[in-house]
Image: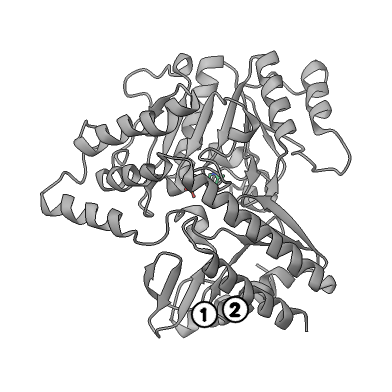
Amino acid sequence: LSDKKMKTFEEIESAVRSYSRGWPTVFEKAKGYKMWDTDGNEYIDFFAGAGTLNYGHNDDTMQEKMIEYIKNDGIIHSLDMGTTPRKEFLERYKEIILEPRDLDYKIMFPGPTGTNTVESALKIARKVTGRDTVISFTNAFHGMTIGSLSVTGNSFKRHGAGVPLHHSVSMPFDDYVDGQNSIAYLERFLEDSGSGVALPAAIILETVQGEGGINAASMEWLKEIENICRRWDILLIVDDVQAGNGRTGTYFSFEPAGIKPDVVCLSKSIGGVGLPMAITLIKPEYDQWGPGEHNGTFRGNNLAFITATEALKRWETNDFSKEIQEKAQFLSDSIKEIINKYPELNGEARGRGLMQGIAIEKEDLANEICAEAFNRGLIVETSGPSDEVVKFLPPLIIDKEGLAKGLKILEESIKAAIS
Ligand code: PMP
């Protein structure tokens, strides 16, 4: 941590008010896109649990369904056993999400977190191909365990593993080096037997890198990556843990590219109301697990199945998607306006859907803006390898008024931070 951050951390810890470095208070309540602390201060949430609260805090119907289920002695924990909430989730997921998109996947419950789904994806790719290398990308984030960290392109986080991580090769993400075609680079490595890059089991990517700084891949790049996978018989894993569940404007972030990944990782907002849940979607021909080859205690959170099924109802028509896209346009227009209004910020607008950000070169300025925003009642977080991007992930159910209010606070915070 930088000296400045360390100081804030120590101040918070000694004040014994919170364990959070970024938001030095104790939160008590939340509804929709708003949160309140124990002092009664109201905050607009542009963080949404890093993309876990796409449907907002404490959705009324999700809350009611959970209460009703508990009151009726519904089964809370059941490992991977068949239960009514699990059955209903599986049926509705196929009906509402997969079939209308002409997608055929087996649905696996790999464990409760995003990291669990990534681990299962890496494992199955290695098992079905018999190859051990996986290609990932610069600035990628896929998790903190040994496997998922080995495909995470962040040297600081990798350092936490203590010793080098194996079985992965990092390639430049779309637009990593301005004007250079990263696809040609990747293909050259695969073609050249002397390159030292072995034929990989899989390529894993985020269509929009969340933790890595809101880097959005172009649709052309995604299509070309899929072509490479098909040509070389490599599995394509899309990690939609953060960008999925509607975050970019469509249910899956890869839909506009028209690609069909072999494996898709989903977590965060899949549980609807913030309960831990993850699924791994695997093309039927690659579902080659033997019984008990990938298990774990917490794979069947029935309360999460209930709220997850409720969340799926938003996707029964195209209305939610359209709504998100309209709000996304409003957000990106507003961000561009702010950037133009404050040239000293030297900001760059990034992202897609309601997953956007402002990249700011000046050291620590993004963090200062977030701190100013918190003091004014807006929760925003930074991302990127040097915390250089102010990242906006409001709940997808936010209305324009909420967005406008948050953006007003953002603008005031920028003014304060640059003055
Ligand atoms: N993949 C992506 C793209 C993520 O953004 C994250 C979490 N930020 C993960 C995987 C890991 O998820 P979790 O923290 O639930 O293990």
> Disc number at residue 217?
none
x 77%, y 38%: residue: 172
x 43%, y 16%: residue: 288
Q: CA distance from mark 2 to mark 1?
A: 6 Å
Q: Are marks 2 and 1 in contact (CB under 8 Å)?
A: yes
Q: Residues within 10 Å of mark 1 (few under 14, many from 20)?
A: some
What secondary structure is marked by label 1?
Answer: helix
Residue 386 horizontal/vertical position (percent): 72, 60
Q: Is residue 126 above or below residue 32?
A: above
Q: Is residue 157 above or below residue 87?
A: below
Q: Quadrant of the C terminus?
A: bottom right
Residue 418 horizontal/vertical position (percent): 77, 79
Disc 1 marks which residue?
A: 12
Residue placed most toward the observer, 372 or 198: 372
| Residue type for callout 1 | Ile
Residue placed most toward the observer, 204 or 42: 42
Q: Quadrant of the N terminus?
A: bottom right
